[in-house]
Amino acid sequence: MMLPAASGLVAELQEVLPHEAATIAWGERFAGALVPGMLVTLQGELGAGKTTLVRSVLRALGVQGAIKSPTYPLLETYNVSRLYLYHFDFYRIKSPSELEEAGMRECFSSSGLCFVEWPERAEGWLPAADVVVALQMEGQGRKLVARAYSQSGKQCLERMRSA
């Protein structure tokens, strides 16, 4: 499980998610702890549950209809109650310069909420994450480690603990 170095770490939360329903429930709780302007990155191998987690957050935040994986378009945008939600998937990115050419930087300078899968493919281009969520397969379930690297990230994880 690849996570940034502990320098700058302000909080950590670990949970075992024994099945997909637990991943969805965690995402629903996470949705209630997020605030606009946050950047959440998701790490884990293919099939680890990153998109499932983001879908459950988006549903809990009120997104209706289909929630597609942004693997091919790189970005799916949702507007819920004047909040912009950006779901990125950088799996197919070969170089961070591709993102600059696509004009995606403005998404990260807004008060929207950004979720980024495969952030390591955009290393050096992405701003620092508020929360890094890493998912690792363990048997039929997953191990989830969420680390906060900002005050808003720390407050988010504190809200998760009390939820």
Image: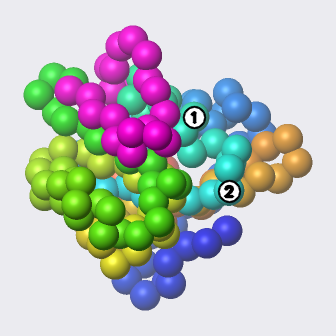
User: In the image, is residue 88 above or below residue 100?
Assistant: above
Q: How many marks?
A: 2
On the rendered structure, is 83 left or right of 45? left
| Pointer 2 or 1: first along the chain | 2
- Tell me which corner region of the image, top left, top right, bottom left or bottom right, holds residue 1: bottom right
Instruction: Choose between 43 and 57: the one closer to the eye.
Output: 43
Q: Is residue 23 above or below residue 36?
A: above
Q: Secondary structure at mark 1?
A: helix
Q: Residue at x 33, y 27 (%)?
A: 61
- Residue at the far right: name it: 139
Residue under the image location 39 percent in, 45 percent down = 74
Looking at the picture, does residue 69 appear above or below residue 11? above
Where is residue 64 shown, x and y percent of the image?
35, 13
The magenta span reads 60-79
Relative to 41, 104 lies left or right? left
Is residue 12 magenta-colored?
A: no
In the image, residue 53 lies at what x, y percent?
54, 38
* Camera-nearest residue between 109 and 61: 109
Q: Which residue is mark 1?
A: 52
Disc ID at residue 45: 2
Picture residue at 39% right of the left edge, 39% below the top: 73
**86 displayed left or right of 48:** left
Amino acid type for the residue under numbered disc 2: Glu
Amino acid marked by disc 1: Thr
On residue 34, the disc is: none
In the rendered image, the vertical position of residue 66 relative to residue 123, given as above or below: above
Residue 76 magenta-highlighted: yes
